[in-house]
Amino acid sequence: MTTASLARDSTPQLRFSSLLGLLYFATLAWQPYPGSAAVKGLSIATLAWFAWSMGARLLALGLAASSLGDVLLDIRTVNLFIPGLSSFLVAHLIYTTAFYKSWQYPLRIWERQSPGM
């Protein structure tokens, strides 16, 4: 798949996610309203779907967990703070795992190399 075809294939998903994100921020003054949790969650869930379709499974799972956290924190009829916070914890653990697995070289901060080596 070329870069041009990737950009063309992903455009609807990314536009939909951007549109939902903008809609959520544009309606912050009227929070909470029926469906605000869905708008907030779908903006990130769309990115998870995009990442999954591109083969970035760990990134997709992290985004899905973040989306769930957003929805849980946006539901205000019951106290879902701890489940929402837990969902973000899981998301960050997944992001850390994805970052670690994609790291190609050992990170050696403590070794100094002199210029010219």
Image (spheres, rainbow, N blue to C red):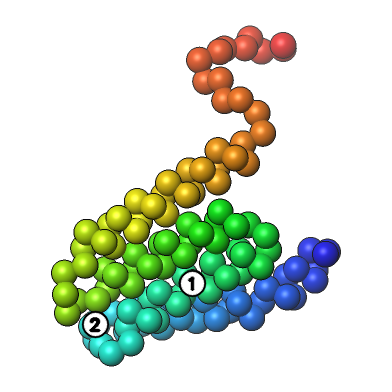
Q: Is residue 13 above or below residue 33?
A: above
Residue 6 is situated, as x and y percent measured from the top left of the image, at 75, 68
Tell us which disc is closer to us: 2 or 1: 1
Q: Split into 4 quadrants, where in the image is the C terminus? A: top right
- Determine the residue positioned at 48% across, 57% down: 62
Image point (34%, 58%), residue name:
87
Q: Hey, which residue is sitting farthest right in the picture? A: 2
Query: Can see residue 24?
Result: no
Q: Residue at x 63, y 57 (%)?
A: 56
Q: Position of residue 7 (x, y in %)?
A: 73, 70
Q: Of marks 2 and 1, which one's residue comes earlier in the chain?
A: 2
Which numbered marker is on residue 45? 1
- The picture quadrant where one finds residue 67 is bottom left
Answer with left or right where residue 34 lies relative to residue 96: left
Q: Nearer the viewer, residue 70 or 27?
A: 70
Q: Say whether residue 67 is left or right of residue 36.
A: right
> Circle 1 — which element?
helix
- Read off the residue under disc 2: 31
What x and y, as percent, mark residue 64?
A: 47, 65
Q: Which residue is at 66% across, 13% downward?
A: 115
Number of other residues with Cα within 10 Å of mark 2, as a class: few under 14, some 14 to 19, many 20 or more: few
Q: Secondary structure at mark 2?
A: loop
Compared with 74, 65 (above or below) is above
- Judge left or right: residue 88 versus residue 3: left
Task: Bin the neighbour count of mark 1 within 10 Å (Cα to Cα): few under 14, some 14-19, many 20 and up.
Answer: many
Q: Is residue 27 above or below residue 47?
A: below
